[in-house]
Image: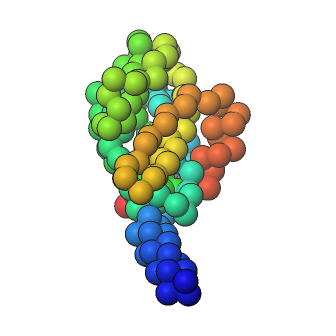
Amino acid sequence: MRSIRRLNLAALTMAMVTLAGCEVEGPVFKPMALPSTKAIIYVYRPYHYIGSIEEPEITCGSDTIAIGAGGYHAFVEEPGTMKCYAATAPGNPISFAARPETDYFVRELVSVTLTASQVTLTKVDRTIGLDEIESTRTPQ
């Protein structure tokens, strides 16, 4: 019985180490100047210990990038209908109307099980986005 508990503890420890990772290192968030003819979509990923090693690709508008845990990316796009989605779930995009001289915030959450990871993108209010993104960093 004791050996089974030790094996379970060892397996759990190995799983936690495997699912853990490092956060993005680089300059902290600094908002860009809003261009008069484009929209800025900030996609950010708050740091969470579990699943931080995963870096799924995110497409927003015409650009695709992998965002690490605790990181963000500013997508500068033409105004119009904006679609953002994870490469693992292209059939489940979020869509919204993007206007020039406006910034938008999209939160990326990655949940991990022992067999797969799942990405959830959520467009958030500017006030919430600014609050949550302030501790993120852009990769160097």
In the image, residue 46 sits, relative to residue 3, either above or below, namely above
Q: Nearer the viewer, residue 55 or 25?
A: 55
Q: Residue furthest front?
A: 1
At 47% from the left and 58% from the top, the residue drawn is: 51
**In the image, residue 81 above or below residue 112:** above
Query: Of 103 and 14, which appears nearest the observer?
Result: 14
Q: Position of residue 111 (x, y in %)?
A: 49, 48
Q: Is residue 137 visible?
A: no
Determine whether 62 is above or below 135 in the image: above
Q: Quadrant of the N terminus?
A: bottom right
The answer to whether any part of residue 39 appears in the image is yes
Residue 84: image quadrant is top left
- Point out residue 125 in the picture as x, y percentages from the top left corner: 66, 28
Q: Residue at x 49, y 36 (%)?
A: 120
Residue 105 quadrant: top right
Q: Is residue 91 left or right of residue 13?
A: left
Q: Quadrant of the C terminus?
A: bottom left
Q: Residue at x 55, y 63 (%)?
A: 49
Towards the viewer: 134 or 92: 92
Residue visible at 44% across and 64% down? 19
